[in-house]
Image (cartoon, grey):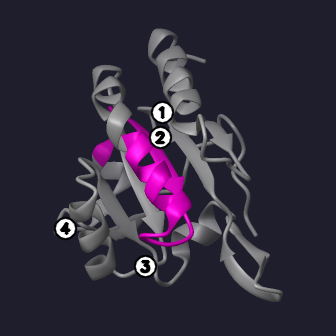
Amino acid sequence: MSSLTIGQAVPDFQAESTAGEPFQLSQRRGSHWVLYFYPKDSTPGCTQEGQDFRDLYPEFQKLGADILGVSRDSLKSHERFRCKYEFPFELLSDGDETLCQLFDVIRMKNMYGKQVRGIERSTFLIDAEGRLAAEWRKVSVKGHAEEVLRAVARLAANPSV
């Protein structure tokens, strides 16, 4: 799989969004983007991660950053999940795994003693120019949103880094 490196331009992508229209990266230049990949809507870890990003969302906004959650779930599932937990940010549906492949987040995982293909919880920070500024893989939910916020603050303070 293709693996992006820090400082590299993220290839343009488009994905179905709970906003009602496709999200396209090239049309959103000028803002920093936090793109977090999670395994499944409405599961405990994914819910907590979404709530953590939700609770810090105003701070991300003050720093010129927006947040997008990504999983392979359908838009219908995403909309229920988003509404139930009042996420102020959009969720992207990646049913065909295009974004998962671009960001290389699909892994073989053990689930109840069986090997299954699934999303490895990962987060990517894309700068206002569309370059990969930071990445987190094999994410533990606790404290993660705060860590990403600190990275966004550093990027906002020094955008050339």
- The amino acid marked with disc number 3 is Asp
Q: Can you say whether 142 is above or below 115 in the image?
A: above
Q: Which residue is mark 4?
A: 21
Tell me the quadrant of the picture where the C terminus can be found: top right
- The amino acid marked with disc number 4 is Glu
Q: Are marks 2 and 1 in contact (CB under 8 Å)?
A: yes
Q: Picture coordinates of residue 125 (x, y %)?
A: 53, 39
Q: Are marks 1 and 3 in contact (CB under 8 Å)?
A: no
Q: Picture coordinates of residue 77 (x, y %)?
A: 32, 79
Q: Are marks 4 and 2 in contact (CB under 8 Å)?
A: no
Q: Which residue is mark 3?
A: 73
- The amino acid marked with disc number 1 is Asp
Q: Look at the numbered disc 2 and give the secondary structure of its residue.
A: loop
Please state if 129 lies on the left or on the right of 29 as rendered.
right
* Marked residue nearer the N-terminal end (3 or 2): 3
Q: Distance between the Cα atoms at labels 2 and 1?
A: 5 Å
Q: Distance between the Cα atoms at labels 4 and 1?
A: 22 Å
Q: Nearer the viewer, mark 4 or mark 3?
A: 3
Q: Can you say whether 76 is above or below 13 in the image?
A: below
Reply yes or no: does residue 50 show up in magenta. yes
Stretch of the chain drawn in magenta = 28-53
- Observer able to see residue 131: no
- Which mark is drawn over residue 127? 1
| Residue depicted at x 27% and y 28% | 58
Q: Nearer the viewer, mark 1 or mark 3?
A: 3
Q: Look at the numbered disc 4 and give the secondary structure of its residue.
A: loop
- The amino acid marked with disc number 2 is Gly
* Marked residue nearer the N-terminal end (4 or 2): 4
* Marked residue nearer the N-terminal end (1 or 3): 3
Q: In this orientation, which residue lies closer to the viewer: 75 or 49?
A: 49
